[in-house]
Amino acid sequence: MKFIWPTLILGLTLGLTLFFNNGTDKIPPLGKILNPFDGIWTQAENTQSFSNHTFQINGISKPVKVVYDERRVPIVNANNLKDAIFVQGYLVAKDRLWQMELSVRAAAGELSEILGTGNNNAILKKDKFQRNKGILISAEKDVLQWKKSPKDLALMQAYVDGVNAYIQQLKPKDYPVEYRLNNVSPRAWTLTHSALFAKNMAEVLAARQYDIQDTKIKNVLGDSMYHYLFPDWNPKQSPVIPKEHIWNFDQETSTTNDNSDITHSNYNDLDVIIPAGEEGIGSNNWAVNGTKSQSGYPILCNDPHLALTLPSVWYEIGFQLPNMKVHGVTLPGIPGVVVGFNEKAAWGTTNVGHDVLDFYEIKWVDETKKEYWLDEKRVKPKKIVEQIYLKNGEKVLDTVLYTHWGPILKPEHRNGDAAIDLAGQWIIHQDVPANDPISFVKMMSAESKEDFFEALKNYILPAQNFIFANTNNDIVLQSKGLYPIRKPQQGKFIMDGSKSENEWAGFIPSSEIPMTVNPERNFVASANQHSTDSIYPHYYIGHFDDFRGRYLNRKLENFPDSSITVRDMFRLQNDNYSIEAEEALPLLLNLIKDKNKTQTEKQIIKKLEEWKYTFDAQLEAPTYFNEWWKLFQTETWDEIRQIQPSRYPDSWKLIEMIENAPNHQFFDITDTEKIEKAQDIAFSTFKNAIKNIDSKNAKWVQQLNPSIQSLSRIDAFSVKGLKTGGYHNALNANKGSTGPSWRMIVALGETPTGYVVYPGGQSGNAGSPFYDNMIDKWDAGEYYKIELSTPEMPLYTDTFNPKQQ
Amino acid sequence: MKYIIPFFATIILGFLFHLLLPFWAIVLASLLVGFFLCRTAGLSFIVTFLGAFTLWLGMTVNISIQNEFILVERMGDLLGEVSPYLLITGIGIIGGLLAGIGGLSGWALKKTFYYG
């Protein structure tokens, strides 16, 4: 009897300890996480005192000194490039390890191993979809290409070694909070992981296509209506390469325009969940030369628009080597400086947006689906078995079939039950010599325009409008990337996969890709619009935003010579003006000018009439316009909405139709007996817009609701309720949760000066004062000034000494 | 004295054990305190509870002040609108609870094996 109580008490002790050590499915291991000794409080950084550290480390040849400025941006002082890149890897890992882990695993399809399979297996499903797309396989192929150039490989390897040097010295109690919450440990970094990070960017920026939507729309509406609504060219466009540019080559491939056999099946059952790419992902960049600027030297500006997350997709860093001083941002996972400047030059980038992913219908020989037809020959698809590891240690096998075109999209990643199989041909699967990340290392020391071209020589993906300016007053823009050679209309719709003639006819040679050097207009600029005018000899399709580009080119053209200052560029990057509103609103107002209106309606019309088309945070007019314009599009395209999946025509097309064809059949609402015209739906949607908007909640910022989301979707680690305005078709392309993820303005000259900001902080640690410290400045449209010198008031200094062997 | 010695012993021993062992260091420390320094069951639970509560709470407060409460506020949000003060108190209670049953176990072991 006497042992019962002690046994019970000991049992309870053990049980409680185990509970606090292991947690349950729903409850995290609270003792392990919350105790103040080796729990997550190791990540509660001291906000007041900072001290210098010295590390002995393997993998560098000379001592490296890292000086942190007051925003805790590291300035790496190294003796040679390899040491500098090694330390870059170390520093990025130190600040962004979980982000690196998460981005790479998300791209590869390896999330289930650390996060579990998720509710309803959502995470496992996402992993399987990534495997189906073949991202991991294409990253592994990239590494094989890198290995062909040992000199570049050594630098990539130095970066990988630097990341691992940090991971290896990390004790479990110092793991980032998210590792602790998920009860997992970091794994070693590899070259494949760096390649995966680059693929991740390619997936965000180079996977947009409308093949399935457009095939369905064309099937339902017919050829001529499709082409009326979705023309290849916007007559008002202002392309990246000035219209007057002369192309001194012809497209050599056959230009037979007979594509009648490209779409022939009935695709009405086909429904696919491939995201067509988010709107609001885009960018602006421009550079003016000394003729335009007041200083006589170029000014270069860049603001990439991406998802706004904490931590940010960008990591700021400076380098001081014997032969170069650089400052800019990098992506955590690849070496170098993606957007930045050195003593002689500056560079930046925007997305090109060409469609580089096409779908082909596979024609099976019989129902067993063991062989498919290709030019009357039977071909067996190649089977690749993907192994997906789960958090509980189990393994899931998933077979992906690869055809001549690429992987077959598995039915589980599609909706609808159309009895056809589609294979995707995607530029990321092309096995061509390239090393995208190394371009950003070479760019660090680029001074002449030849250096710039040389740095980009092996860059293919994702295609970017790279701009470059230097103190010799050269300004250059090159839309660098790998682009398929297409026949007219090829790749807009699902193609017949049994005919090899439907294949891309190779790739556009680099001498023929869009490029402009020192153009007469004295500036280069891009904002995700069409790369060229329609006279460009190669046919291309894609997703293009024309409004920002038109506005940008108009503004830059209108600046008189020798006038542009850095202050003008601040204003331009934060400009909320939209040409879309400038063109659409007067037309809408004109359509309803003769209708009888209530007092409230008259007041709102007055607000709209007085509005200067700027999407400023505190105004109400943008809210009413936005709602009205949205409803107007929904009502106009009611016929298209019934087709699923589909997409609306571009809004510039609708503007053109109101102007030229206000009685067009599309303005009729099919559900009603009456034949509506543009003015009818303009008035009804105006009334509905007013009804939809709560007048107490009508300020634009209340609609936009700008916020910076945590990458792990943890609300507690996000920042909400920001004050900025913006609009996706304005230069300040703020869409609430996507927008200007990095703003940079560089005034070149004797001492080049940069003005930079991003909505986040250097640290990925939610317990750090440097987690979100730059958000307020970004929100207010302000900048930090950067000079290429060692900070006068450093926060602290880390010294890395090579370990004595 | 019969309260003060085991109370401080829990804090000091707990702190030292925590330098070497994971979070259950506090269970072990209070088990020893319960075994050697406590005469009654009630005492072994309450005193070690209070000692560990003070230690864990004090440490968390100290860390949070240096951190200007950044992390403790975010963690509170993460656990569902828990205020920083409540979270810090909760952490003290977890430490106290673990220590309390540890102390009680120590006392029970002593009762069973030492006094026979």
Image (cartoon, coloured by chain):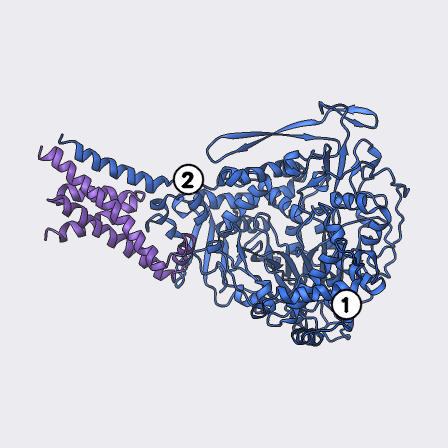
Chain colours: A blue, B purple
In the picture shown, does residue A514 fall above or below A253? below
* Identity, as a three-letter code, of the amino acid under mark 1: Glu
Q: Residues within 10 Å of mark 1 (few under 14, many from 20)?
A: some
Q: In this view of the protein, which residue sits in the foreground, A203 or A337?
A: A203
Tell me where residue A48 appears, x and y as whole percent. Answer: 39, 64
Tell me where residue A28 appears, x and y as whole percent. Answer: 39, 44
Q: In this view of the protein, which residue sits in the foreground, A142 or A154?
A: A142
* Identity, as a three-letter code, of the amino acid under mark 2: Asp
Residue at x 25%, y 39% (from the top left corner): A13
Chain letter of disc 1 in the image: A
Secondary structure found at label 2: loop
Label disc, if present, on residue A583 of the rendered structure: 1
Residue A150 visible in rendering:
yes
Label disc, if present, on residue A25 of the rendered structure: 2
Tell me where residue A38 appears, x and y as whole percent. Answer: 35, 47
In the picture shown, does residue A221 fall above or below A280? above
Q: Is residue B78 left or right of residue A781?
A: left
Q: CA distance from mark 1 to mark 2?
A: 55 Å
Secondary structure found at label 1: helix
Q: Is residue B54 left or right of residue A270?
A: left
Mark 1 and mark 2, same subunit? yes
Q: In this view of the protein, which residue sits in the foreground, A439 or B60?
A: B60
- Quadrant in the picture for the C terminus of chain A: top left
Q: Quadrant location of residue A254? A: top right
Label disc, if present, on residue A74 of the rendered structure: none
Residue A432 visible in rendering:
no
- Quadrant in the picture for the N terminus of chain A: top left
Chain letter of disc 2 in the image: A
Q: Quadrant location of residue A184? A: top left
In the picture shown, does residue A578 fall above or below A456? below
Q: Is residue B71 left or right of residue A576?
A: left
Residue at x 64%, y 28% (from the top left corner): A384
